[in-house]
Image (cartoon, rainbow, N blue to C red):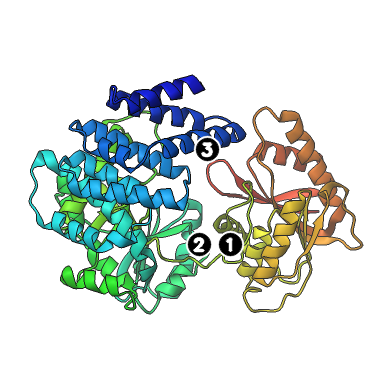
Amino acid sequence: MTEQNINEVLNNIRAGKDLRQNLSSLREILREESKAGIRERTSKLQVYRNQICREWNERDWNSFFREEDAKIRKNAANLAGDLLLLEPDEGWSRRIGEILWRAYLDEKTLFVRSIYLKALALTDCSLYMEEMQKRLHQLGQEEHSTEKIIHIRAERQALEAILSRENGRGDSLHWKGITSEQEILLECQPYICGPLKEKLDGILKNAKASRIVPRGLRVRVSESNYEHVLACRTYRDFLFYVPLRRGTVADQKGAAKAICSSKLLPILDEIYSRDERQPEEQRQLKEAGGKASYRFRISWMKQVRETKTETKRDKVRADGSWIRRLAAQIEEESAHRLVNAPGNYQLEILLAAKKDGSYRVYLRASLYQDRRFAYRLYTEPTSMAPYKAAQMTELLAPYLRSDHQVMDPLAGVGSLLIERAYTLGILPSQRQEADCYALDTYGKAVAEGRENVAAAGLRVQYINRSFFDFRHEYPFDEILTEAPQMTAGQKEEREYFYRAFFDQAIRILTEEGLIMLLSDQGNLVRKQIRLHDQLRLEREIAMGERRSIYVISRR
């Protein structure tokens, strides 16, 4: 829109002409400008914001919020929020915050109340905390009709968001640990389940305490062993399994009732603790009868195997409104001990669809800090996930030796060499017996890799150079690496890479050296082995449906 357009809209608003539409048009102008380039967006938005804030005083805003048409009040509150998002000066923010707060207290129309609160959330609300807390408590005590409940939920969520931010509630809740026997899921791929189960059987001293399921390993842990189990490096994530009683109804109300009557809340009360130094938290706990509340989000877990045929169950899973209604029902069924806060949550409730149309429920304790890969200070978009590096080196354990001179010619930020050291027991505390070399042509990754390996405590010679022209005074015993994944249209580049890779590998390997290569190009790898009569394929180890590790020796 042009300058004339915005001035026309502002003149209409000033004259009180068609306020609902013109307030909406003004918001649209701001949205359109926000989509422009950075320089144009910054300058024009600043001009428009200054113009509106300069021309409208407290009397103008109050007049909007006294209009009989509730949608005018709603549009004005939304506009105030839009302007607050544009980082206005502190004085204006404080003044508009006071106006919004008075308007909220006076507002009788339910669907407008949450709009005031969302705009208020962008201001300093510290002066209103006690009254907000009382209002939240009041909403929880009142009975509401079906047609009102959706607006009451929106108001509760907006109040919860402000209170959690101002009270620092996220900082007062901490991971405490597991104190009773619990069943957890270690998420991992089928190819690593066997080796991981074998390791866990040694930790748990009971083969029946773990079993392979479609999503990984379900494991029964206790206070005495859960830390040893969670220290294993080859799973992706861990979740608490929350069994539901048999016969659970699959609609929102039935599901919410089953989830809230399950072990979910007892698990949360066990694993989380609150900072007793927070007086506001203690007062809230006392008012709630000593029972803490928790902020959650809920979502579907990705299917283990994607199917091409869309079923009725798949359509339900794709419907975001179904999840939103379920979240609202969970709030009600839990007496608001579970509060839906997708943008500021302390736990995740995850639903896994079953063939019979029902589902399993898992809990992710979002405040648990996984320190297994704390060395990973830096990463790049193409970096190998550290748990996958750990899986690869675990599968290769029979071929790794601590006294081998090893090189990763495509090292990136160094995860593969670090996880190799963990697999061999060199990390975290043993002495390193041989040299490690890491090569990469990307200078930033080399600098980041040096920081990562130093944080891990591993000695690695990091070199910013191409593997294909690298020379060294002595040969290497191992080449351990992941080949780059190339697109279907890069046929010539793939052919060149694999031919040059194996040519160079033969030059720098000892006579009994090994190449351990993770690749999605099995045909090209086997072709180059046939073309290089000095090489022999010792073993192919699957890592998923498309990639394998190729263990290749010189002969």
Helix, strand or loop at mark 3: helix
Quick one: label 2 or label 3, which is nearer the N terminus?
3
Write down the quadrant of residue 462 in the picture: bottom right
Q: Residue at x 26, y 47 (%)?
A: 359
Residue 195, numbered circle: 2
Q: Nearer the viewer, mark 3 or mark 1?
A: 3
Q: Amino acid at mark 2?
A: Pro
| Residue 34 seen in render | yes
- The Cα atoms of the two marked residues, 1 and 2, are separated by 8 Å
Q: Which residue is mark 1?
A: 394
* Image position of 549 (left or right of 491): left
N-term-proximal mark, 3 vs 1: 3
Neighbourhood count class around disc 3 (C-alpha, 10 Å): few under 14, some 14–19, many 20 upward = some
Quick check: marks 1 and 2 in contact, CB under 8 Å?
yes
Residue at the spot 89% in from the left edge and 59% down from the top edge: 472
- Tell me what residue is drawn at x 60 percent, y 57 percent: 389
